[in-house]
Structures are given as C-alpha cells and as structure tokens.
Amino acid sequence: MGQLSFRLILFFCCIQFVFSQDTLYIYKAKGMSLLEIGENQSTLKKGALIVAKDVVKVLSNAEFTAIDNFGNTYLINIEGTYGLKHLQNFKVKQNTSNFTASYFKHIWQELRNKSNKKALIAGVFRGETLMTFPTDESKIASSKITFEWDLEEGEKLYYIFVKNVITKEILKIETNGSHLALYDDNPIFFDNDTFEWTVTTDAFPNVDNIPFFSFKLIDRNIYEELKKEFADFIQDLETLGHSEKEIELILCKSYGLCK
Amino acid sequence: MATRNTKLLWRDSFLCTVLTLVVSGIFLLIFVNLSVLDPFYRAFKDFSFTDIYYSTLINDEAVFKDVIIVNVKQSDRFTIAQAIEKVQEQYPKVIGLDVVFRDLKNPFVDSILKKTLHKHSNIVTSYFLENDSVISNHNDFKSDKDIEGFINMNLPNQDAVVRDFIGVKDAELYSFATQLALESGKLKEENLLKLKDRIPINYKGNQSSFLSFDIDELLELESIPAMQNAIVVFGYLGTPTGNKFDIEDKLFTPLNEKYVGRSTPDMYGVVIHANIVKMLSSNNFVKKAPKVLIYCIAIICCFLTVMFGMRLYRKSSLAYDVLIKFIQLVISIVLVYLALKLLKLNIYVFITPILVLTLFGLEMIDFYVYLVDYLKKRFKWDSYLLD
C-alpha cells in the first residue's frame, strides 16, 4: 500500500513537471528586447525560445507577445528585466464571455438591426501615406537629409526605406519617432543622386506595392540656379516682408526645392 | 369524449405532418429544378446556421505553435529552397509545401530546388485533381520517396464555403493535411478510417491563431527554436503578409464575418490546411450526426409542434393567428441555440431540415384546416380542428 502511494506521488510529480509551463515562444516582437542566456545576449526575435534560466530585458517602447504550449498568450509591454516566472504574470486574459449570453446578445442585435454599418465608398482610399517631408520630387541641397512623417495612433515603431533608384539597393531603418536624419556620407547615397523613400508601420511590407516619394540630391550651385526660376515669386515674398529663411522654407514646402 | 379528441388530435397531427413533408418536398424539387429560382436555391444552399458559431460566437484567442505557417509570397524557387533549408536546420517534424511547381523555369534554380526536395525525407508536397487529371510538381522535382497529398477543397458535393473535408479519397489518396498529420506521427491509425467520409473542420481560428513567418523574415533569423518538432507549412498568406485586399488562394469559411450574402473570401488555403492539421494532430474531431437521425428528429419535431399548434388553434384561432409568428421566432432561436451548443461540444447537427420542417409544419395548419373542412363536407370527415 505504502509503495503504491509512493508511486502515485511520483507519478503526479512527473505529470506536474511535464505539464508545467517552463518554456515560452515569441509570437511577435516590436522594438528592442534582449534575451540573456548565460553570458550571451541577443535580440529577442519571433520564434525565439525562453526557458526558466533565461532573462529578458524589455527596453523602452518595446513589446513582445509570447505563447506557451497550451496556446496561452503573454503580452509584455512594460520596460524591465524579467525571468520566466515574471513573464507568466503577463498572461492575456481570454475572452471568457458566456456562450449563451453571447448568442442571445447577437440575436438581440440582429433583431434590433444593430449590425456594424461601415461607410461604403466607391473610390480608392489613399489616406495611408504617412510621409510629410521630403515631398515627392524634391531637390535637396544639403548634407543632412531629414525625413519627417505623421504618426499613426497606436503605432510605436516605424520603418523607413530609402531606395537607390538605379541600383535598387534599399536601406531600412527602424525608429520610434516622427523624424529621422541621414547624412550624405551614408553609403546608400554613393554612386547616385536620385532616391526614393517611404515609411510604414509594417516591418516587412511589399516594397513593390507601396507608394514612394522621390528626391534628388543637388549641390549648392544647382540650388542657386534652380532658385532663379522662382525669382519673381521670391521678389513678391520679399515685398510681403518675408525673411530669407522664410522664403527658403516656402520654396522647400511648396516647390520641393530645399536647402 | 376526451379520448376521442386525443385520438383525433394524434391523427390530425400525423396527417398534417405528412402534408408538410409532401409540400416541403414539392417546394424543394421546384427550387432545385426551376432555373428561374436558382439564385434563391444557391443562396440558401451555401448557408448554414452553424456558421454563426464560428463567425460570431467563437472567442478562442489561443495561438498554436505546433503548426507553423511560412508565407512564400511571390518568392522565386531559389528563395523557397533556401527557406526550406533554413527550416530543416530547426529540426521540424515535417514540412508541407502548399505550392505546386508544375513547370520547369530556370535550369540552375530548378536544380537547387530539386536537390533540396530530394535531400530531405520529411517533406510533403501537394497536388490537385482537376477533371480526372492530376496536377502536381514537374517530374524533375519528384522522387521515389515523395510524400504527396491532394489540396482540393471542392470535392464533389461540397459548397463554396469550406466547412468540411475528405481526408482519404478512394482509400489510397490522402489529403495534404492528412499526410502532414500522419508524417508528424500525431494522427492515430484508428482515426484514419474516419477520414474516408466528409467530416466537419473544427476551425481553431484564422491566420493569427498560428505562429507564422514571412519568408524574408524567416531568412533573416539566425535560429527559430519554435520550429523544433513543429509541423511547418509553406503557403501563401498574401503580399505583404495578411494583405486583406489580396484574394489569391483565399477561400470562404464559416469564420467569415458576413456569413450570409455577398462577401470577400476570408481565409488563405494554407490556413485552412493548418486548421485541419491542428484538428487531426490533436484528435479534436467534430462528430457529425447521421442524416437519418436528423430527418427522424425533424419529423418528430414537426409532429410535436403541429400538435401544439393544433391545440392552440382549437382553443382560439385568433390567439393562434396572433401568436404563431412569435412562436416560430422562439422555436427557431431555441433550435439554432441547441445546434450551436452541440457544436461547442464537437457535435455537428445539420439543423436546417429540423428548423424548416418545424416552422413549416406550423404554417401548414391553416391549409390543413381548409383541407379537412373540404373533406368534412364531401366525406363527413372527423377532425380535431372542426367542431
């Protein structure tokens, strides 16, 4: 009898061990989180494994979703350093609304004709372009190229793509703000003077199917030459009392000729 | 007197039920055969009340890692070969290719893909059956060790909405998902027999319910521990991944938010395969109630509601006329609820015949009254409904 009890206890201990949640897998990751395995440190990426002895460092503006073997999800979006046990505190609560209640709520909504009525348009919506500067077909006479874009609600990370139109080489940068500056000594700007850029919230967009704005790098002499084409306009602006800086800004914003 | 009335009630209920069956049979024949009414028949043919369960009521937000999807996008064969090699380095249980390489393109690139496909013994390739012919990979990509599965979703008698599937066709042809589950060692032999008949797919969710990788993303990663011992399926998930406007290899499923009327396809083919693989590998089958049982229940329900309706009619024909629509509404809500509740318990009941006969039986009482009235005048016919 005693032996049987011992075996049962041993069996249940084994079961407990087998079914314990001692691993998590990364389902998706945004921003920079680090995984420390012993003395090694690596960036936490999709598909990575977190075991009991690992330590995860979540940096600012970063978040990741992990899953366990039973399909439970864990959303970690607070900066800090966590062990596996701590990560398990971030378990996402499943929607446990009662089936019967959900059904009768649905029937009630149907009876009241309260279905979600979205606006129906017969046109192409192109509101998703975030890029604000440089505008399309800009000419820039500066060693510093600043990219600016609108922020999208709920999105923390943005992916800037700068494409060399001749070599099709693409520079991809992840950032969390609304602007980014690059200098013309960046290797992407070698060998050519015409480029395209775009910004998305998707880390892996189809670059053949998203809008790009083009810009050209010019030197100061060409800038001055092109500026002469706007001589009358500049004169009008001077008459109105605009300073030289203000006029340059207007030329840049309105005509894409930037210094 | 009471016994006589009871007998008459039983007889009238029985005869009204028979009348309901005959008339509904005639209506069904008209709907099926008259081309002018075809749109109505088609609209109803593709509708199932149980779709409400998946489209509206399912709230399972679980994410599974034992079936992993890789989006091949529009990648070339070289990239796909590289991705297969990358996945193999992670020691998956099995790799499925929901992609058919029918023709040869570039000799060099094709040779790389061929070498990759021949090198590994845990790759399941796909083919499909069309007009009695088999469309599969080019012979150059095939070998003696090939494991193939068919990817047809519209086998005979299936609707445009993918609700069920056949795992084993003609005793020897295995579906793609069946092959994946078998090769992974997670499908029990005894369950293989069940797959000879059409069985409902126990959907776990759409794309977000499975760990998935973009092929470019996959190639950038150094290692993917999640793929160890997993079933990895290569297929198309849109370009870019999850693009809602991309409908290539996208099909209608019960998970479609718009479960009746016109809508756009909602699930990529590879996600349907992933759902089937998940169902097979976790032995989480939905039992389908036999048709005979459903029609027996339908006739019994029709008989009982007709009996109830006749009693109400006898008490007050005005109350009957006023209440009948409300009763029909309540009955339909309750019957659909019961069907959905059973589906939640993994029992699929085709509720439409039960619902139609039950509601139609109540409608037929008025016509039955006219009929027995005529019979009474002509043959002195006794009826529970006539004084």
Image (tube, coloured by chain):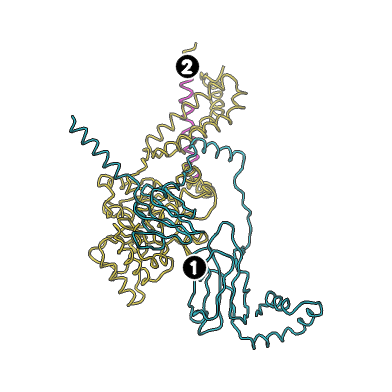
The answer to whether residue B249 is above or below residue A255 is: above
* Mark 1 or 2, closer to the camera: 1
**Residue name at image x 56 percent, y 23 percent:** B373
Q: Residue furthest right?
A: A239
In the displayed structure, B277 sits above or below B288; it is below
Q: Residue A36, located in which quarter of the rendered image?
A: bottom left
Which residues fall within the magenta stretch?
Answer: B5-31
B11 in magenta: yes
Chain A representation colour? cyan
Residue toward you, B379 or B373: B373
Tags 1 and 2 touching, CB below 8 Å: no
Q: Is residue A110 magenta?
A: no
Q: Is residue B343 left or right of residue B119?
A: right
- Please give the residue where the numbered disc 2 appears in the rendered image: B6
Q: Is residue A124 visible?
A: no
Q: Amino acid at mark 1?
A: Asn
Reading the image, the residue beneath label 1 is A206
Q: Secondary structure at mark 2?
A: helix
From the top left corner, tell me how far across and down residue A161 is, in percent. Answer: 52, 71
Q: Is residue A31 visible?
A: yes
Mark 1 surroundings within 10 Å by alpha-carbon count, few (fewer than 14), some (14 through 19), many (20 or more): some
Q: Are marks 1 and 2 on the same chain?
A: no
From the viewer's side, name the closer residue of A76 and B55. Answer: A76
SS under mark 1:
loop
Q: What amino acid type should be assigned to the residue bearing mark 2? A: Thr
Q: Which subunit holds the residue at mark 1?
A: A
Which secondary structure dominates the residues rendered in magenta?
helix
Chain identifier, yellow in the render: B
